[in-house]
């Protein structure tokens, strides 16, 4: 697991639980790594490495360093997973199908409209995942510089995308049937709640202030982390992921922290 900061990540807990359930003598470690250190670290890894998980700020930075990028990862401009294949390192994205699975399990088949809070790499993955359930998206963002990147993903997956500034966040989320918050902890603390389904990618601390005041159903970031990690396990090991074992391990680890 690479990223910066990385010490808070639950990914090692989930992957180690999977390896134990699959009776694999594998290791999974969290390694502090920023964009400047990524090229050297990646080139230093020998054949014993089956793959890597990536978090911010590396999901986009890794793309030009890879031997191959899967179509989905290229479409959203972000790879949260790197696996070793005969031809070298291949970038994959499990954030998109992980969120799609979460929505399916939450009973979301079709919605008229959805809102994404945030405009980073996770938001780009959310655009692709939400294209399965809606043709109309609104992104609430602070930096309009990322608007074109999100627009390109929306065009790729065939959805209409509108952009609103952060000052309009409250009025935008209050009436939306589905809201996906992709921002780090603390970013949405002052927003008012809504009544649709909220998916908040934060899992620690939980609940977030936004999740606590939300009037509709809420799905927390742990479930999203479990779903995308399960797909990573399958890509790296070739075996079916023990999702329930991973979920239980994550819940216990969060309970132990608090």
Image (spheres, helix red, strand yellow):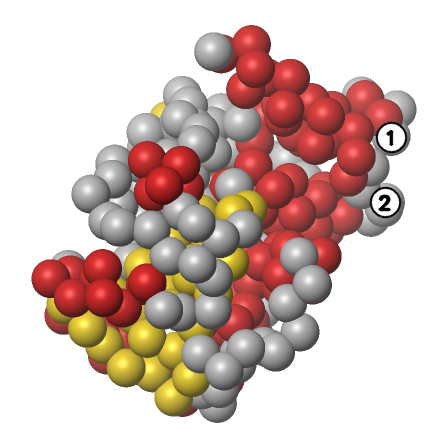
Q: Where residue 35 sits: x, y (%)?
A: 28, 43
Q: Where residue 32 sits: x, y (%)?
A: 37, 26
Query: Is residue 235 visible to the viewer in this orientation of the structure?
Result: yes
- In the rendered structure, find residue 22 and report the number of the disc placed on it: 1
Q: Secondary structure at mark 1?
A: loop
Which of these two is toward me, 220 or 210? 210
Q: Indicate whether 140 appears above or below 218.
A: below
Q: How many marks?
A: 2
Q: Where residue 157 sits: x, y (%)?
A: 50, 84
Q: Indicate whether 38 appears above or below 155.
A: above
Q: Secondary structure at mark 2?
A: loop
The local crowd at label 1, few if under 14, some if 14 to 19, many if 20 or more residues have their Cα within 10 Å, is some
Query: Is residue 39 visible to the viewer in this orientation of the structure?
Result: no
Residue position marked by numbered label 2 in the rendering: 239
Residue at 42% of width from left, 84% of height from top? Answer: 136
Left or right: residue 159 compared with residue 36: right
- Which of the 4 image quarters holds residue 140? bottom left
Q: Indicate whether 38 appears above or below 142.
A: above
Residue lying farthest left? Answer: 167
- Which of the 4 image quarters holds residue 53? top right
The answer to whether marks 2 and 1 mark residues whose Cβ atoms lie closer than 8 Å is yes
Residue at 52% of width from left, 72% of height from top? Answer: 130
Residue at 56% of width from left, 62% of height from top? Answer: 96
The local crowd at label 2, few if under 14, some if 14 to 19, many if 20 or more residues have their Cα within 10 Å, is few
Which of these two is toward me, 161 or 56? 161
Q: Where residue 24 sits: x, y (%)?
A: 83, 26
Q: Indicate whether 28 appears above or below 105.
A: above
Question: Which of the two discs, 2 and 1, labels the residue nearer the N terminus?
Answer: 1
Residue at 62% of width from left, 49% of height from top? Answer: 228
Which of these two is toward me, 26 or 251? 251
Q: CA distance from mark 2 to mark 1?
A: 8 Å
């Amino acid at each position: 697991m690479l990223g910066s900061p990385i010490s808070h990540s639950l990914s090692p807990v989930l992957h180690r639980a999977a390896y134990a359930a699959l009776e694999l003598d594998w290791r999974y470690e969290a390694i502090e790594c920023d964009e400047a250190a990524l090229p050297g670290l990646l080139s230093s890894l020998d054949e014993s490495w089956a793959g890597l998980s990536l978090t911010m700020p590396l999901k986009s930075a890794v793309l030009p360093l890879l031997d191959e990028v899967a179509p989905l990862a290229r479409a959203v401009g972000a790879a949260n997973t790197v696996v070793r294949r005969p031809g070298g390192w291949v970038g994959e994205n499990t954030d998109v199908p992980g969120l799609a699975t979460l929505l399916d399990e939450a009973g979301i088949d079709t919605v008229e409209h959805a809102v994404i809070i945030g405009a980073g790499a996770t938001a780009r993955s959310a655009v692709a995942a939400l294209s399965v359930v809606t043709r109309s998206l609104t992104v609430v963002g602070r930096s309009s510089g990322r608007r074109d990147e999100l627009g390109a993903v929306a065009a790729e997956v065939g959805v209409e995308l509108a952009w609103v500034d952060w000052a309009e966040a409250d009025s935008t989320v209050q009436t939306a049937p589905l809201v996906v918050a992709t921002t780090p902890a603390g970013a949405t603390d002052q927003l008012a709640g809504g009544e649709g389904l909220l998916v908040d990618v934060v899992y620690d601390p939980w609940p977030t202030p936004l999740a606590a005041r939300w009037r509709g159903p809420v799905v927390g970031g742990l479930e999203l982390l479990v779903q995308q990690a399960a797909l990573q396990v399958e890509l790296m090991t070739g075996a079916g992921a023990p999702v329930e074992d991973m979920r239980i391990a994550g819940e216990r680890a969060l309970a132990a922290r608090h």
